[in-house]
Image (cartoon, rainbow, N blue to C red):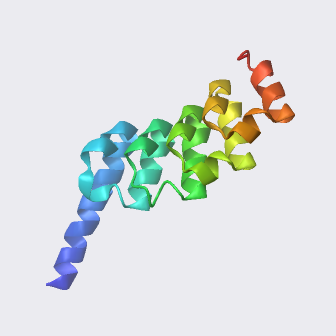
Amino acid sequence: MGGRLAILYKKKLDKAVQKVSEKGLRLQSLVDFKTNREVVLAAVKQNGLALGFATAELRVDKGLVLAAVVQNGLALEFATAELQANNRVVLAAVKQNGLALGFATAELQADQEMLQLTASSGVV
């Protein structure tokens, strides 16, 4: 019986990955999979803002948050405070969208490199 349940779960998992790969914000309605890194990663790669529907446990995952902000810098809003203070994560977010700097820590908002990058993207 356990093998059959594993097969059924795998089919549901594959279907969830397919759904969010087509439209990342579908993660909102996939309650059973918001804790699944594979599903959330597929969602944020399609739409970084899907990070807002991920569980708190996954919002601390640096790789997952990086994937989200590379796709949409504004996803930085949904990252943990620790990652909003992470130079690499914020830099990736600001490169994608200068407005993302508004979600970084005050220290990084005052960082000259970040300010120059933001200015060069046309955001003041």
On the rendered structure, is 121 left or right of 103?
right
- Residue drawn at x 31%, y 40% is 26
> Residue 53 location in percent, x, y?
37, 45
Q: In this view, does 76 lie to the left or right of 3?
A: right
Instruction: Specify the quadrant of the image occupied by residue 121.
Output: top right
At 74% across and 47% down in the image, what residue appears?
Answer: 87
Q: Can residue 48 be seen in this view?
A: yes
Query: With respect to residue 65, does 8 lie above or below?
Result: below
What residue is rendered at 73% in x and 33% in y?
Answer: 109
Q: Where residue 54 sits: x, y (%)?
A: 40, 50
Q: Can residue 23 be seen in this view?
A: no
- Of residue 4 and residue 25, the one placed in the foreground of this image is 25
Q: Pinpoint residue 83: horizontal percent, then vertical percent.
A: 62, 51
**For the C terminus, which image quadrant?**
top right
Write the residue at 13% across / 84% down. Answer: 1
In front: 43, or 15?
A: 43
Q: Where is residue 107 in the image (x, y as percent from the top left)?
A: 75, 40
Q: Image quarter for residue 23?
A: top left
